[in-house]
Image (cartoon, helix red, strand yellow):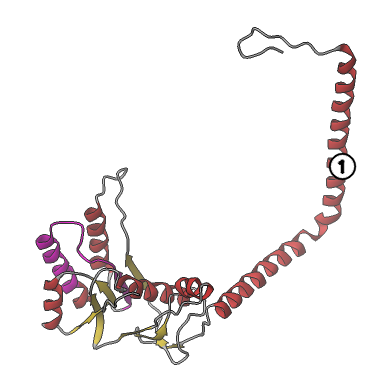
């Protein structure tokens, strides 16, 4: 061999050549023996392939059920009462990840009560930044989705909820340079999809409704979208800072205002 610059050459002593060849032969012999053993074991197990496959699936199912049970114990979760109505009455709710995080540091999670029914289909939450609006919305989203995936949820056992055919989410920033989507364009795409597909069996959860553009324009579009969602009969939770949406709620049935309170931290 030689160095990268080609100025230094390396010569293998003749005494080492024989030893290196011997090591290579032993390595090849080891590989052949490993393949022979694996082939014999495979031949022995091959007749039991279907049984092993069933056992593998069974073990995976049992492991999944056990994981769900352990997670339910850690989060103090229960099964709420299920109803055929698309109503939600989550009492004493806690976000499971927030609960686990606070549990480790001996902090207390302040629970929430969330109710959506025929008279109060859509909840508009306003309030100061860092007041907890998004936490309430995300808690509702994750608990409903967990329940519909077969998981127990951290609520009081007298809580009631239905099963929704559609769960529509607009949370976070989905801007994409690759797809030529700005922050507001991505929100508008979601709003378009929601208004076209929402019905009485839908749950809609929107965080920071209408933001990402000039406030007057964003507020007007958000109000039009909210009116359409209300007319569809869908249920949902929406967080916002827009005053015009709060006034819209006061003049329309099926929607209710709520506000978060910011307390002094010590």
Where on the picture, by quarter, is residue 116?
A: bottom left
Residue at position x 11%, y 65% in the image: 220
- In percent of width and height, residue 23 lies at 87, 27
Residue at position x 87%, y 48% in the image: 40
- In percent of width and height, residue 217 lies at 10, 60
Asked if one can make out residue 240 in the rendered structure from this viewpoint, the answer is yes
Q: Does the magenta stretch include residue 70?
A: no
Q: Which residues are the magenta region?
A: 201-228
Q: Mark 1 points at which residue?
A: 36
- In percent of width and height, residue 252 lies at 13, 82
Residue at position x 72%, y 62% in the image: 53
Asked if one can make out residue 165 in the rendered structure from this viewpoint, the answer is no
For numbered disc 1, what is the local secondary structure? helix
Name the residue nearer the viewer: 10 or 211. 10
Left or right of 193, for residue 219:
left
Left or right of 194, for residue 61:
right
- How many residues crowd around disc 1 within 10 Å: few (fewer than 14), some, or many (20 or more)? few
Name the residue nearer the viewer: 85 or 208. 208
Instruction: Determine whether 55 is above or below 175 in the image.
Output: below
Residue at position x 61%, y 72% in the image: 67
Left or right of 238, for residue 243:
left
């Amino acid at each position: 061999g030689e160095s990268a610059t080609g100025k230094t050459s390396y010569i293998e002593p003749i005494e080492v050549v024989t030893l290196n060849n011997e090591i290579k032969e032993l390595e090849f012999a080891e590989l052949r023996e490993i393949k022979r053993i694996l082939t014999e074991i495979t031949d022995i197990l091959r007749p039991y392939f279907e049984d092993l496959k069933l056992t593998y699936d069974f073990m995976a199912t049992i492991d999944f059920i056990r994981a769900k049970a352990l997670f339910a114990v850690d989060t103090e979760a229960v099964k709420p009462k299920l109803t055929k109505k698309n109503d939600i009455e989550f009492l004493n709710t806690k976000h499971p990840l927030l609960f686990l995080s606070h549990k480790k540091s001996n902090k207390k999670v302040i629970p929430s009560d969330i109710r959506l029914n025929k008279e109060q289909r859509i909840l508009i939450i306003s309030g100061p930044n860092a007041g907890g609006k998004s936490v309430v919305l995300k808690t509702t989203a994750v608990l409903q989705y967990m329940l519909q995936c077969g998981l127990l949820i951290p609520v009081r056992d007298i809580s009631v909820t239905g099963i929704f055919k559609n769960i529509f989410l607009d949370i976070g920033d989905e801007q994409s340079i690759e797809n030529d989507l700005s922050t507001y364009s991505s929100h508008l795409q979601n709003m378009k999809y929601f208004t076209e597909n929402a019905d009485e069996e839908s749950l809609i959860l929107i965080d920071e409704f209408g933001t990402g553009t000039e406030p007057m324009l964003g507020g007007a579009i958000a109000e039009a979208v909210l009116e359409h969602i209300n007319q569809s009969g869908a249920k949902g939770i929406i967080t916002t800072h827009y005053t015009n949406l709060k006034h819209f709620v006061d003049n329309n049935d099926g929607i209710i205002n709520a506000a978060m309170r910011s307390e002094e931290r010590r």
